[in-house]
């Protein structure tokens, strides 16, 4: 088996679940909901073709195979983290360096204050170096905790408890809805009841902001993430939606350009929507450098304005 970024992400989730003793307890560390954690573990079990843990009325426990996987996972992640730390040491710590992590497609939202924040600190610091990386939600938190990012900007419902090691700053809210192509069965009618009936037999691709199902009565069929196809970000979800193979959960501001040209159609907009809270996040325990602290204060002021 060749390890991908997806595999490493799933292994980190598994490690958190195993070490905390269950899905519910892992929420506080990972910052995602129990259904999302369960989906990650199920995905990992499918990829490894082995059952990793027992869950249900009898309580949580690792299987024999799960204990073996945990042992190997600890070795692997420890080696990777040590390797990354050495690379950081080689590169040194620039005092006027700002490292920001974001989830995809936030730049298309006019409410996003990050670019304005960068503009402000660029005027305040000479010879400023800025690095911006686009990562999955969990990868953003992993890079932040590893000291490779100063601030991350992520979308979440935060229904799970915010991890204690993180300081969060709510920036704005982003609303996502269901969309389909006019050729999709859901796009053949504007009647919400008929659309909902079609939804129950449709494949639905959801972007990575979604930590909980839109509706408990609606079964969401998500593609298995692999090297060829991914449904974990907004762009890949939009590709599938435009192709007519899936109904897509897409931020409304992002879908609007295709709605205006008739390439996408809203699906039961009064019934199905998800509000993602966009947060800036940093570590509580870390003393921020001057640049990171400056942009944090700027973002805080912009929020109050």
Image (tube, rainbow, N blue to C red):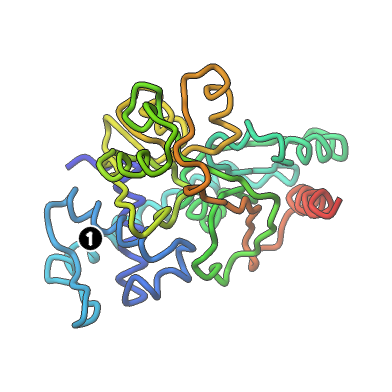
Q: Residue drawn 30% across and 71% down?
A: 18
Task: From the viewer's perspective, tell me whether residue 268 is left or right of residue 155.
Answer: left
Q: Residue drawn 61% across and 53% down?
A: 277
Task: From the viewer's perspective, tell me whether residue 153 is left or right of residue 59.
Answer: right
Could you say where residue 213 lies in the image, as x and y percent from the top left?
39, 55
Q: How many labels does the image show?
A: 1
Could you say where residue 72 lies in the image, as x and y percent from the top left?
23, 60
Q: In this view, does 61 lie above or below 202?
A: below
Could you say where residue 168 lies in the image, as x and y percent from the top left?
65, 61
Front-most of 216 and 290?
216
Q: In this view, does 168 lie above or below 5?
A: below
State the residue position of label 1: 72
Front-most of 119 and 202?
202
Outermost residue, top direction? 261
Crowd band around label 1 with a 10 angstrom C-alpha radius: few (<14), some (14–19), many (20+)? few
Looking at the rendered image, the quarter that the N terminus falls into is top left
Front-most of 241 and 264?
264
Where disc 1 sits, the SS reads helix
Q: Residue drawn 49% across and 45% down?
A: 87
Could you say where residue 204 lies in the image, as x and y percent from the top left?
34, 40
Front-most of 46 and 88?
46
Q: Residue drawn 74% across and 46% down?
A: 95
Q: Is residue 186 above or below residue 101?
A: above
Q: In which quarter of the image is residue 14?
A: bottom left
Task: From the viewer's perspective, tell me whether residue 82 is left or right of residue 200.
Answer: right
């Amino acid at each position: 088996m060749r390890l991908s970024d997806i595999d490493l992400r799933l292994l980190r989730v598994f490690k958190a679940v195993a070490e905390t003793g269950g899905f519910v307890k892992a929420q506080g560390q990972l910052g995602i909901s129990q259904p999302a954690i369960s989906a990650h573990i199920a995905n990992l079990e499918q990829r490894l073709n082995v059952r990793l843990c027992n869950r249900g009325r009898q309580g949580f426990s690792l299987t024999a195979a799960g204990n073996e996987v945990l042992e190997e996972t600890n070795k692997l992640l420890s080696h990777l983290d040590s390797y990354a730390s050495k690379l950081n040491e080689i590169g040194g710590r620039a005092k006027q360096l700002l490292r920001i992590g974001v989830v995809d497609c936030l730049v298309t939202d006019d409410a996003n204050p990050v670019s304005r924040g960068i503009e402000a600190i660029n005027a305040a610091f000479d010879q400023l170096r800025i690095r911006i990386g686009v990562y999955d939600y969990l990868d953003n938190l992993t890079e932040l905790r590893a000291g490779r990012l100063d601030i991350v900007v992520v979308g979440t419902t935060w229904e799970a408890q915010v991890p204690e090691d993180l300081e969060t700053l709510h920036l704005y809210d982003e609303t996502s809805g269901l969309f389909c192509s006019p050729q999709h069965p859901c796009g053949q009618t504007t009647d919400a009841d008929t659309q909902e009936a079609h939804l129950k037999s449709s494949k639905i691709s959801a972007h990575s902001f979604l930590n909980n199902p839109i509706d408990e009565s609606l079964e969401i069929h998500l593609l298995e993430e692999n090297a060829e196809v991914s449904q974990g970000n907004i762009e890949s979800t939009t590709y599938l939606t435009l192709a007519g193979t899936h109904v897509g959960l897409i931020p409304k501001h992002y879908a609007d350009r295709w709605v205006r040209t008739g390439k996408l159609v809203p699906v039961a907009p009064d019934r199905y929507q998800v509000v993602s809270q966009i947060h800036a996040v940093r570590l509580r325990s870390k003393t921020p450098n001057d640049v990171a602290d400056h942009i944090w204060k700027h973002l805080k002021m912009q929020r109050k304005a």
